[in-house]
Image (cartoon, rainbow, N blue to C red):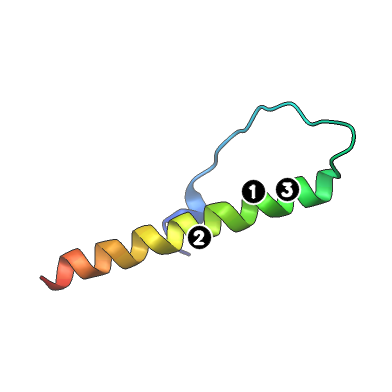
């Protein structure tokens, strides 16, 4: 189990009726995964210096 799987965040936002909830959640998950990946890569680079 990774350290990230133990972190839980809550999100409160407005959702326009024309936006599908599934698409909204997908976008959030994709964005957070990219951010975690970028931070992991940065951390690995800093550790190898």
Nearer to me, 20 or 40: 20
Q: Secondary structure at mark 3?
A: helix
Q: Residue furthest bottom?
A: 48
Rendering coords of residue 20 (x, y %): 86, 45
Q: Is residue 8 left or right of residue 43?
A: right
Please give the label number shown on residue 19: none
**Quarter of the figure that contains the C terminus:** bottom left
Residue position marked by numbered label 1 in the rendering:
28
Numbered circle sitting on residue 34: 2
Density class for disc 2 (Cα within 10 Å; few <14, some 14-19, many ≥20) is: few
In the picture as drawn, the residue positioned furthest to the right comes out as 17
**Left or right position of 27 against 6:** right
- The residue that disc 3 covers is 25
Secondary element at image label 1: helix
**On the picture, is 1 further left or further right than 12?**
left
Query: Height in image: 34 above or below 10?
Result: below
Q: Secondary structure at mark 2?
A: helix
Q: CA distance from mark 1 to mark 3?
A: 5 Å
Image marks 1 and 3: residues in contact by CB distance under 8 Å: yes
Residue at 44% across, 57% down: 36
Q: How many marks?
A: 3
Q: Position of residue 42 (x, y in %)?
A: 28, 62
First-in-chain label (1 vs 2): 1
Q: Residue at x 49, y 46 (%)?
A: 7
């Amino acid at each position: 189990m990774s350290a990230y799987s133990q972190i839980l965040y809550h999100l409160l936002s407005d959702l326009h009726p024309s936006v599908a909830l599934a698409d909204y959640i997908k976008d959030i998950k994709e964005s957070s995964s990219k951010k975690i990946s970028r931070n992991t890569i940065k951390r690995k680079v800093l550790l190898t210096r």
